[in-house]
Amino acid sequence: MTHIQTLLSKISDRSVKIGIIGLGYVGLPLAVEFGKYFKTIGFDINLKRIDELKKGEDRTLEVNAEELAEGKYLEYTSTLDGIKEADIYIITVPTPIDDYKRPDLTPLIKASESVGKVINKDNIVIYESTVYPGCTEEDCVPVIEKFSGLKFNTDFYCGYSPERINPGDKEHRVSTIKKITSGSTPEIGKVVDELYKTIIKAGTHLASSMKVAEAAKVIENAQRDINIAFVNELAKLFNIMNIDTLEVLEAAGTKWNFLPYRPGLVGGHCIGVDPYYLTHKAQHVGYHPEIISTGRRLNDGMGAFVAREFVKLLIKKEHKVHDSKVLVLGITFKENCPDIRNSRVIDIINELKSFDCSVDVYDPWADSGEVEEEYNLKLLSTDKVNLENYSGVILAVAHNQFKTLDFKSVNKNNFTIYDVKGILDPKLVDNRL
């Protein structure tokens, strides 16, 4: 029996062992799904994270205690010895950008080093992290070869199956989102595909190569980024023309093929990051991507635009901008979710501070410790929220809790409301994107 047949047999009889590297927003839900059917070992270098999961707690709120318990064959470890018996390793670490908007492959390289230290002959390493086309073979494989002493596509193999997790989304889950699969050889591609078919109810799409799968993933978010950039530019234009952008989009949306994008801040670990991976690779091969780069620049400037428009509103109401107290509602990158990664709300806050405004931030979903560590901000506690203490409010994130705040109680003549998300009654607000 060949190694391919052996792996397929192990998948079929549920005896294959799986190691998941990284237990964040992507890795944990995946580990739980695989843990329902296979012996699965979830590995993370964060000891606190491992301890919480062993207690049935998930701080990301992606998986509740009941769902965690459904992964009956799932174990957790922070040591490499705990995953050395795996047949298939799946790497789900984040792929951020650095301060210069360049891909930061540090977590990916470190994870590849870890796997290289424990991998055995005929094992498969599958990457789910979003990367540019060619990254798996060009950047990750050499690291595994170096630390394992094994030869790629002779002693070990790779696959690429990009994550499509949407943090905070309780409808589109791991098993209900169609999965792209691929392998470093056609035969390994089939093994990877069969593995994911065991947990993905929505089905799989086997790509012809890992590069195709890598490219497919990165353009998913680049496409959304460009579409949002278009409506953000419309918002800027219509603001000058004194036209309500959301009313325009609502009217245009009555046509069957009009795409329902809305203006806003573009942050998070995907849309606000992934296009930079594609532009980086494009420039590396000698092509300057004009539309992708322009869309990114426009979206990256929306936080500062909102802050400046808000300051103009303060001036119109004869507020002294210097030392004006402003309340920013929300710091997570999206609504009803605790994820603060790459939140562009910080751009609003920093721009307001450049005008010497005094800024408070309130977010009932965010972890105060994480916010202080990441953004050097102290969150306002719920009992301290009093709209009357401020010159105005910027509603930056559409958390459900913000919809219940009593905006009607403030004197609109002296109080400014800027609704970034367009969730409040237009009659209550001074402006919105």
Image (cartoon, rainbow, N blue to C red):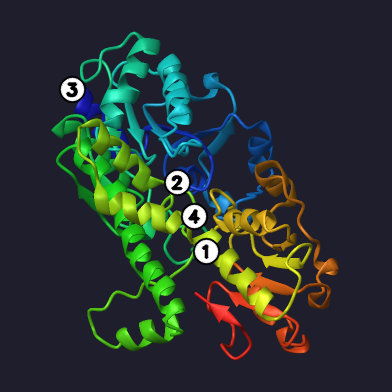
Q: Residues within 10 Å of mark 4 (few under 14, many from 20)?
A: many
Q: Nearer the viewer, residue 123 or 353?
A: 353
Q: Nearer the viewer, mark 2 or mark 4?
A: 4
Q: Nearer the viewer, mark 2 or mark 1?
A: 1
Q: Earlier in the sequence, mark 1 or mark 4?
A: 4
Task: Give the distance between the C-alpha atoms of the residues marked 2 and 3, in whole angstroms.
Answer: 28 Å
The residue under label 1 is 305
Q: Is residue 161 above or below residue 235?
A: above
Q: Nearer the viewer, residue 164 or 407?
A: 407
In the rendered image, is residue 73 in sight? yes
- Assign a secondary structure to mark 1: helix
Q: Earlier in the sequence, mark 4 or mark 3?
A: 3
The residue under label 4 is 267
Q: Nearer the viewer, mark 2 or mark 3?
A: 2
Q: Nearer the viewer, mark 1 or mark 3?
A: 1
The residue under label 2 is 30
Q: Residue at x 47, y 27 (%)?
A: 106
Task: Give the distance between the C-alpha atoms of the residues marked 2 and 4, in whole angstroms.
Answer: 23 Å
The type of residue carrying mark 3 is Thr
- Answer left or right for 243 relative to 46: left
The type of residue carrying mark 2 is Leu
- Assign a secondary structure to mark 3: loop
The residue under label 3 is 2
The type of residue carrying mark 1 is Phe
Q: Earlier in the sequence, mark 2 or mark 3?
A: 3
Quarter-wise, where is residue 258 in the image? bottom left
x and y percentages locating residue 349 in the rendered image: 65, 57
Judged from this view, the residue extending furthest toward the bottom is 427
Q: Earlier in the sequence, mark 1 or mark 3?
A: 3
CB atoms of marks 1 and 4 within 8 Å: no
